[in-house]
Each structure stands twice: as structure tokens, then as C-alpha cells.
Image: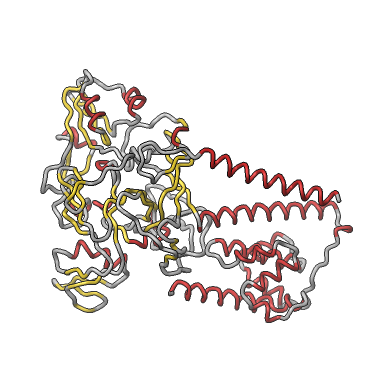
């Protein structure tokens, strides 16, 4: 309800600005000045008087799309009153209500009549250019509507979901899978997620130019939610602990498998996942993978390994005794085959010791025994647990309505939920916990949470590190892979770059079925393209015949 009240307020304010700055122009066009204040109908009149498609008015106040269409309608209006120079159009775009008010309150604004019979060649050329620009604008708007309200393209830049999703897979995400999450930043540049550009490693990411106006915001709301993420679903969500973007829907998108839902208990024992005390259910397209460290007497043929198995070692380190290889994402069968190679001296699955702090790889640490302990507070969730990737939990996933106990031991588990995800003022002073200024020892969870973990368990930045994923961060479910490019991205941390090629066998296959052998939907793609271009051809044929008549 808060979402629609806020949205209505924005519409009322914009309509008041429109009316105040254009009422006289509406009077000159032969309409009551009061109609300039009426949402939608004011733009309907502009489209009618300027001879444009009147159904475009339906796009006037949509989030993200609305500001683009309003700008187009404003340009139509000022052109109708003879304001066609570059400066006049620029002012209409940059300061719409200010410039339209200047035209509105000028001495005697008049509608500029246009007769096709008396147009010069230059004027006809200019009109054709305006038509082309209008067509391109509408194409952008149409694509934006699809992107914002239906489905969104998503690329896989890392190997955390190998072999289910490969680095270089490009997916379409269904935004209605778990109910449609209404846009929360309605004024934004189309097709950009969070920033316009990256200023690089030396700059502060928080200073990167944003692709949206953060000051104009709408609260979280989800409509038509007939289902929620289920165990084993592959889910796209916004990274919960993105500190650069305050807007939930503008945080970085991630894709992982939902291994546990609200109310479940998860645990890792020696790298094996258990949910509610039972071993996880392995899907048909989900191969169980582990991390192995191999010691070789001589250098391996990395390219041959890639050609055969479709992966590269994360790192290769030369030592006095030969070479050390860090393999992530090996199945038991693949590990057995590599271990049998004549160059391999020793190869073991890597499992972190129980009750040891989280550990991460450091290339220069290999010379000192290959591994190096890191501060747990920077590595694992929650920060006060002596857990690691292979020995983790048990941990219960919070559920809406749960009443949790708060003390110094449990607070790290719930502090992000209370302060960041459910927007309360949390204070921990002198051993006492305060929420919104009141001392308390318990808290009621306001929404469901999920545990999202990558299939490539030893090479995945996932919920074991950033914690629970709130329901409000859920974007949707991947539908199918529309393009797959080997070598499109270099996997983070890898010293190798895979050779470039198109993986035709993965294209137009459904993503979220769980089946090992997925059906191809090439025929649907061909049918859609055929209908689109066939319809376009028939429309142009009909218009040409109409002109000839």
C-alpha cells in the first residue's frame, strides 16, 4: 500500500507541474485549461493534437519508462508551438516545466500550422529526421518496458555455478517467477544496473556516477506473488551487502542455487551439505564438485586439460620440487583421471580443518605452505563463529514471524537483518542492545530469508560469507540461455584465459529444469523472429499500398 500511495503522490506532483506550466497552451489548442492538470488525459490531448499514436499515453507514468515518454511528449508540445531550435529542445529536455512555463506565460503563444503542400525540401528532410528519431525513441522505450517489467538479460562472469551455468552464459531472467518486484528508483537510465561507468581500482566505488536518481524513491512492494523460491531453484538476487548502492533493486545481481529456505537448518560437514540433517538432493544438472591440490613433477599441458575437461586450474605455482596446481570444481571422476596422469606426484581433496577460522588462498603464501589464515571477521558469516567453507553451521534460516533471542553471542547473526534489511536503528552499548531506542533481548523477523550457495562449492562467494538473502532482494528465476560465449569473461582469480568460441550446444536451452539433458528451444526463437519480421513486412506493405491508393 505504501508503494502505491507514494507513486500516486509523484503522479499528483507531476500533474500539478504540468498544469501550471501549460494551461495556457491547452487553451490555445481549444481545450479547457483545467485539462492540463488531469493525469494521462493531458498527454492524450498532446498526442491527439500533434498527430501521434494516442496509446503511447499509457507509458506516461511508468517507472523508468515514464520520464523518457514525458520528455518526448513535452518535445511534441513545444514543437506544436513553433519551438524547434536545438537550444529550445535542449531546454525542454533539461528544464521541462521551467521552459514550458516560459512559453506558456509568454506574450502570445500560437499553434504553428503546418501544411505538407507548402513545406520546403529542407523542412521535409527535417520532418523525416524527426520521424526517425521518434521511431528510435520508441524502440528504446519498448525495449526498456521489456527489460524493466518482464525479463532481464544476465551474464555469468564467474565459475561459482559451474557446471550448471558456465562462465560466459547469458540468460534471460523471468521477473514474475516469485511475484513482480515493483521498481524502487523510478528515474533511471535504461539498461544500466547501478552505475554509468566504473572509475577503476584507484577510485572509490561509492563515487562512481549512479545510473539512477537516489533521491526519488519508492518503497519495496511485490505483486502477484503466487510462489516463493524453493529448495534447488536457481535464483537471481541482488547482493545483500552491497555497500555502494542503497537502493535494493540497484545492488549488484548474483545468481546461485537456493539450498535452504526460511525455517530450514543447514550444515556443512567436511564439505558435504546437509539440510535439516539430511544430505542435499543433487539435481540432474548439478555435479558434485570439490577442490583438489595437485603436486606435479613437471608442468601440465593446461590447454589440453581445458580441451578435454572444459576448465582451467585456478593457479599454477612453480616450486623447487616441481609445480603446484589449484583445481576447483572437480568431480570425483575427473579428479581420478587427472591423478592418473604421469606428471602427478600427489593429489588430494582439500578440506579445511574443523574449528579453524575461514581461510582464503594467497598466491605468495604457497611458498610458505600454500595457505594463510585470514581474520574470520572478514571471511565468514556470522563473524563470531569459528567456521569455514567445509565445516559450517548448523545455522537456522530466519522465517517471517520468528521471535529470536538477542544477546552478544547471537547479535552478529541478526544485526544485518535488524539494521539493514528491515531498516531499524540498532545500537549495542555497554553490553545492552537497543532497537529504535528501546532496550530489548528479542526481535520478531519481518520477512523470509534464504540461503544461496553456488554449485561449485569451493569457488563460490555465497551465503556462507555474506549471510542470509532477504526476500526483498529476490529478482527472479533464469528461464533459458540465449547466448553462450567461451572466453567472454576471465574467471576471477584465474591466471588463464579460455580461448574464445560460441557454445552453440548450450543456446536456447531451459536453465531451471534440473534435468541433465535439457531440451533445446531453437524452434521457438526462429518462430518469434519469423513472426516479428513477417508482421513488420506486412505492416510496411499495407502502408505502401495505402499511400499508392
Percent across and percent down for residue 311 are 33, 31
Residue 138, relative to residue 406: is it above or below?
Answer: above
**Left or right of residue 125: residue 189:** left
In the rendered image, residue 220, in percent from the top left (x then y), is placed at 41, 67
Q: Residue at x 73, y 76 (%)?
A: 26
* Residue lying at 26% horizontally and 36% vertically, measured from the top left: 328
Image height of 494 relative to 304, above or below: below
Query: Residue 401's x, y, as percent?
Result: 26, 70
Residue lying at the far right in this picture: please name it. 117
Report if residue 453 is visible in the image: yes
Seen in the picture, residue 137 relative to 500 is either above or below; the reply is below
- Work out whether residue 492 can be spotted: no
Can you say which quadrant of the picture contains the N terminus?
A: bottom left
The colour scheme applied to this rendered structure is secondary structure
Q: Nearer the viewer, residue 217 or 322?
A: 217
In this view, which residue lies farthest toward the top? 342
> In screen coordinates, is 19 left or right of 246?
right
Residue sitting at 23 percent across and 65 percent down? 415
Q: Nearer the viewer, residue 340 or 186?
A: 340
Amino acid at each position: 500500500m505504501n508503494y502505491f500511495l507514494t507513486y500516486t503522490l509523484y503522479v499528483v506532483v507531476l500533474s500539478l507541474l504540468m498544469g501550471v506550466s501549460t494551461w495556457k497552451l491547452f487553451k490555445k489548442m481549444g481545450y479547457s485549461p483545467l485539462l492540463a492538470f488531469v493525469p494521462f488525459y493531458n498527454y492524450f490531448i498532446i498526442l491527439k493534437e500533434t498527430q501521434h499514436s494516442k496509446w503511447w499515453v499509457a507509458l506516461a507514468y511508468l517507472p523508468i519508462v515514464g520520464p523518457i515518454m514525458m520528455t518526448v511528449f513535452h518535445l511534441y508540445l513545444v514543437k506544436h508551438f513553433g519551438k524547434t531550435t536545438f537550444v529550445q529542445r535542449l531546454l525542454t529536455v533539461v528544464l521541462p516545466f521551467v521552459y514550458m512555463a516560459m512559453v506558456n506565460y509568454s506574450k502570445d503563444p500560437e499553434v504553428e500550422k503546418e501544411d505538407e503542400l507548402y513545406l520546403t525540401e529542407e523542412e521535409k528532410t527535417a520532418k523525416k529526421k524527426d520521424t526517425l528519431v521518434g521511431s528510435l525513441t520508441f524502440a528504446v522505450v519498448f525495449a526498456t518496458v521489456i527489460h524493466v517489467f518482464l525479463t532481464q538479460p544476465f551474464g555469468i562472469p564467474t565459475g561459482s555455478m559451474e557446471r550448471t551455468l558456465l562462465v560466459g552464459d547469458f540468460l534471460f531472467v523471468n521477473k514474475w517467477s516469485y511475484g513482480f518486484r515493483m521498481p524502487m528508483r523510478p528515474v533511471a537510465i535504461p539498461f544500466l544496473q547501478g552505475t554509468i561507468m566504473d572509475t577503476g581500482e584507484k577510485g572509490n566505488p561509492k563515487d562512481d556516477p549512479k545510473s539512477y536518481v537516489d533521491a526519488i524513491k519508492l518503497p519495496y512492494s511485490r505483486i502477484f506473488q503466487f510462489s516463493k523460491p524453493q529448495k534447488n531453484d536457481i535464483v537471481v538476487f541482488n547482493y545483500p551487502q552491497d555497500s555502494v548502492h542503497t537502493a535494493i533493486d540497484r545492488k549488484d545481481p548474483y545468481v546461485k542455487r537456493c539450498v535452504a529456505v526460511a525455517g530450514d537448518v543447514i550444515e556443512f560437514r567436511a564439505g558435504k551439505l546437509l539440510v535439516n540433517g539430511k544430505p542435499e538432493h543433487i539435481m540432474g544438472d548439478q555435479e558434485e564438485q570439490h577442490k583438489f591440490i595437485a603436486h606435479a613433477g613437471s608442468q601440465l599441458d593446461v590447454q589440453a586439460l581445458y580441451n578435454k575437461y572444459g576448465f582451467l586450474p585456478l593457479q599454477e605455482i612453480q616450486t623447487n620440487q616441481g609445480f603446484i596446481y589449484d583445481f576447483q570444481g572437480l568431480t570425483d571422476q575427473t579428479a581420478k583421471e587427472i591423478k592418473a596422469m604421469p606428471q602427478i606426484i600427489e593429489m588430494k581433496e582439500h578440506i579445511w580443518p574443523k574449528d579453524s577460522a575461514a581461510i582464503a588462498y594467497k598466491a605468495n603464501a604457497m611458498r610458505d605452505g600454500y595457505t594463510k589464515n585470514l581474520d574470520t571477521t572478514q571471511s565468514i558469516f556470522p563473524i563470531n563463529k569459528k567456521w569455514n567453507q567445509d565445516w559450517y553451521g548448523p545455522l537456522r534460516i530466519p522465517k517471517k514471524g520468528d521471535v529470536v533471542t538477542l544477546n552478544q553471542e547471537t547479535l552478529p547473526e541478526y544485526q544485518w537483518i535488524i539494521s539493514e534489511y528491515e531498516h531499524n536503528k540498532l545500537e549495542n552499548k555497554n553490553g545492552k542492545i537497543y532497537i529504535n531506542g528501546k532496550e530489548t533481548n528479542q526481535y520478531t523477523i519481518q520477512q523470509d530469508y534464504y540461503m544461496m550457495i553456488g554449485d561449485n562449492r569451493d569457488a563460490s562467494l555465497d551465503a556462507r560469507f555474506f549471510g542470509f538473502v532477504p526476500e526483498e532482494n529476490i529478482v527472479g528465476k533464469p528461464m533459458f540461455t540465449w547466448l553462450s560465449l567461451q572466453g567472454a569473461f576471465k574467471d576471477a582469480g584465474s591466471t588463464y584465459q579460455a580461448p574464445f568460441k560460441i557454445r552453440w550446444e548450450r543456446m536456447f536451452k531451459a536453465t531451471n529444469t534440473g534435468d541433465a539433458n535439457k531440451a533445446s528451444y531453437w524452434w521457438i526463437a526462429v518462430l518469434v523472429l519469423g513472426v516479428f519480421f513477417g508482421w513488420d513486412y506486412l505492416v510496411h506493405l499495407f502502408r505502401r499500398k495505402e499511400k499508392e491508393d
